[in-house]
Amino acid sequence: MPKQSKKISKDTGENRVLDLFNRIKKLEAKGINIINFAFGTPGFDTPVSVQEAVSEILRSRHKPLVPLEGLLELRKDICDYIDRTRGFRPELDQIVVGSSVKIMMFTTIAALIKPGDEVITTDPCLPYYKRITEFLGGKVKFAPFLKKNIYKLDIDELENLVGKKSKVLILSTPHNPTGNILSTSEINKLSEIARKNKLTIISDETYSQIILNGRHISPATVDRAKEHTIILESLSYTFNLVGWWIGYYLVPKHILDKLTNVMIDMVSPVPSFIQHAGVKAFQNAEYLIPDVLEKYKKSSRTLIEGLNELPGFKCNTPSGGIHAFPDISGTGQSSLQLTEYLIDKAGIAVLPGDVFGSLGKNHIRMTYATTIENINECLMRLDESF
């Protein structure tokens, strides 16, 4: 039997996330009640207007293939959306419809680096940033995002990491897993570092419209995504299209050919009926986004206030996103030990913070993209456990 490629056989955070997902499914198949706070599943349905629009498309005979860059109508809607939410209007041919941010991140990094190049990102961060980079032959350098329980990016340390082989800077704002948002001054500094060192910023803005306090500012506002900034955004949580796998790339024109050259042999366009779901979501964005946001504000308050009443837990209020990232060092257990304890003894699934990097070792990540009933049940089980 052939050996597995060394590029994909390493024990990484992403492997551990998949292992936990599979473990939850096996326990549930045995009839064991697991409250899942590891993976976000919003406690409300996909908007009826979106469901009805897709049903109509599926019933019709007209189901054309779509171009790689996506439906023209949807791309126009994305231009309007960026104009409203980022304060500048991109050109239509800068927009490419994409699937999940994970796939979009893979194709983008593949378009930008060659073996030996460096990618700079944060610690903690989503584990697949590192996995993708190393799979493509690159090297990852990490700038710290945690300082004594305060979630703040160390920009000076980040700048010190930049070398001759550095090509890409991956940012996440609102940040996953901490929920921090970058300020205008931070974005200006980061953009200047990128410009000066000829880095391309990949800005993961999955939760751009889920802002609990403060204001989302995209790194693309500095160069209007014309020079060195790429936006990747999913519609999953903003419009409650979880599982539909639709998002978009906003790309400078001089990078577009590199990206499409990667995409053309690696990915297929998002199916037309799903793209029509995106069209309907954007058409109704004026009332859909505030409704979704209000629900997340309520669920986040319930979870975070409850966590801070538990002995051994300290949880900052995130500025955005769908996750709490409590410090659990007061429990006397490591993140892995606590994760194992909670799933085995309390029937609660969370992610250990160290899957996101070394600075997450005293944390766990919990999503509040679930029902209020689940949150209250979780808090009750935690109270009984501690």
Image (cartoon, helix red, strand yellow):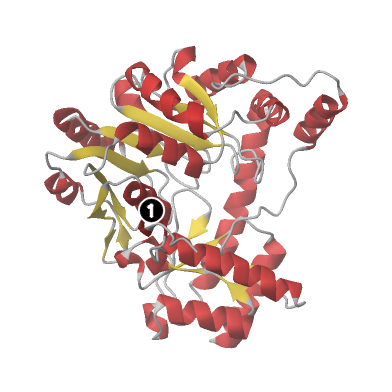
Q: Is residue 334 visible?
A: yes
Describe residue 141's horizontal placement relative to residue 270 as left or right.
Answer: left
Q: Nearer the viewer, residue 112 or 248?
A: 112
Q: Can residue 179 be seen in this view?
A: no
Q: Which of 31 and 348 is in front in this view?
A: 31
Image location (x, y in percent) of residue 157: 16, 51
Residue at image point 29% right, 47% down: 137
Residue at image point 34% right, 45% down: 136
Image location (x, y in percent) of residue 220: 35, 28
* Dot 1 crowding, Cα within 10 Å, few <14, some 14–19, many 20+: many
Image location (x, y in percent) of residue 77: 59, 19
| Residue highlighted by disc 1 | 131
Give the total number of marks visible in the rendering. Answer: 1
Residue at image point 67% right, 24% down: 279
Q: Residue 116, located in which quarter of the rendered image?
A: top left
Q: Which amino acid does label 1 sit on?
A: Arg
Helix, strand or loop under label 1: helix
